Each structure stands twice: as structure tokens, then as C-alpha cells.
Image (cartoon, rainbow, N blue to C red):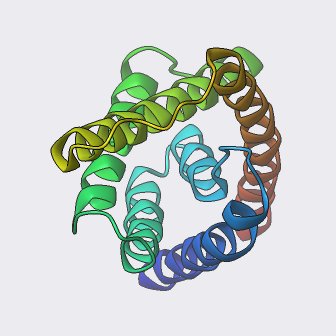
């Protein structure tokens, strides 16, 4: 059990490093690979492993960001709690509709928390939000959601394959 959690944490840590060093700087798409792993683990009823992956990735994000300490950890904890609640109360089985809905909710919730934190930080600093057109923001959100679905499908396929080979 401990080894399985350690492997999940290592995978999430590696994904978060790739996210922060390769994907984010070179892309304007707002998808998150570690969020896809967390959703895949929740969809396979592996809630403690999802929390482990979320904490590992949040710690990488915390160490590589200039935001307030603990901000990413809190946003990640809220997102994971919301995902577990939704999956155990609303989307109770693994289906295509459940996958699409959970991935979309996770992505929009995650981006919403980041947007709210950025807006709050900008207002406290006294600087305004960067002027980006609504069309550009919408296109970034839609393209990010599309890429998030792809990340999610890959993560879910890997998690389910590991489940089948470990039994």
C-alpha cells in the first residue's frame, strides 16, 4: 500500500515538474497534466491516491511559483474534495458522460480558483488584471478544456491498465 502511494506521488511529482518546466512556459493552453491524473484516480475510486497525487503536485507548484505560500495546496485540496464529493454523490460510475463531466468540472473549478486567486492578488497589489479580450480568454479556456480531455483520457487509460495488471 505504501509503495503504491509512493509511486503515485513520484508520478505526480514528475508530471508537475514537466508541467511547470516544459508545458506552461511553452504553451498558452491552460491544461494541467496532474489534474488529469487526480481525476483518473478519483474515477477509479482511489481517493487516497488522488489526494496523494494532488499534494505531491501542489508541493512542486508551490516551490516553483511566486504566489503566496500555501495557495496551490489549498486550491488543490478544495478541488480534490469537490471531485470526491461529486463522484460519490452525483457521478457514481465510470462512464463516458461521467468522465467528460468530471474532467470538465475539475478543469473549470481549477481554472476558476486560479482566476479568483490572481484577481485577488492583483487587487491587493493595486494593479489591474492584464487586458485580454473576452474572445481570447474564451478561446484559451476552450482549447485548455480540449487538451485537458486528452490528458484525462490518457491518464485514465494508464490508471485502468495498471489496475488490470496489478490484480
Q: Can you see residue 167? A: no
**x and y percentages locating residue 132 in the rendered image:** 60, 29
- In which image quadrant can residue 30 be found? top right
**Residue at point 26%, 57% (across, down):** 71
Where does the C terminus fall, quadrant-wise? Answer: bottom right
Left/right of residue 89 with respect to residue 30 in the rendered view: left
Depth check: give the residue in front, 89 or 128. 128
The residue located at (73%, 48%) in the rendering is 28
Coordinates of residue 40 in the picture (x, y in percent): 63, 46
Please state the total of marks drawn on the protein image.
Answer: 0
Q: In the image, is 33 to the left or to the right of 150?
A: left
Give the image location of residue 116, x and y in percent.
32, 34
The N terminus - image quarter? bottom left
Q: Is residue 165 left or right of residue 112?
A: right
Question: Which of these two is toward me, 156 or 141?
Answer: 141
Asked if one can make out residue 74 in the rendered structure from this viewpoint, the answer is yes
**Residue at horizontal 66 percent and vertical 66 percent from the top:** 19
Q: Does residue 36 sit above or below 142 in this rendering?
A: below
> In the displayed structure, does residue 87 sit left or right of residue 37?
left
Q: Position of residue 125 (x, y in %)?
A: 21, 50
Quadrant position of residue 63: bottom left
Amino acid at each position: 500500500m505504501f509503495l503504491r502511494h509512493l509511486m503515485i506521488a513520484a508520478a505526480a511529482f514528475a508530471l508537475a515538474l514537466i508541467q511547470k518546466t516544459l508545458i506552461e512556459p511553452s504553451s498558452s493552453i491552460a491544461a494541467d497534466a496532474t489534474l488529469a491524473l487526480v481525476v483518473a484516480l478519483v474515477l477509479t475510486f482511489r481517493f487516497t491516491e488522488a489526494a496523494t497525487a494532488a499534494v505531491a503536485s501542489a508541493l512542486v507548484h508551490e516551490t516553483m511559483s511566486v504566489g503566496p505560500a500555501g495557495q496551490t495546496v489549498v486550491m488543490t485540496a478544495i478541488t480534490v474534495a469537490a471531485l470526491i464529493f461529486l463522484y460519490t454523490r452525483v457521478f457514481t460510475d465510470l462512464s463516458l458522460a461521467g468522465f467528460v463531466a468530471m474532467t470538465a468540472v475539475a478543469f473549470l473549478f481549477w481554472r476558476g480558483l486560479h482566476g479568483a486567486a490572481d484577481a485577488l492578488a492583483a487587487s491587493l497589489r493595486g494593479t489591474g488584471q492584464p487586458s485580454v479580450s473576452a474572445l481570447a480568454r474564451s478561446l484559451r479556456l476552450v482549447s485548455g478544456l480540449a487538451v485537458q480531455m486528452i490528458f484525462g483520457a490518457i491518464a485514465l487509460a494508464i490508471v485502468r491498465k495498471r489496475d488490470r495488471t496489478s490484480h
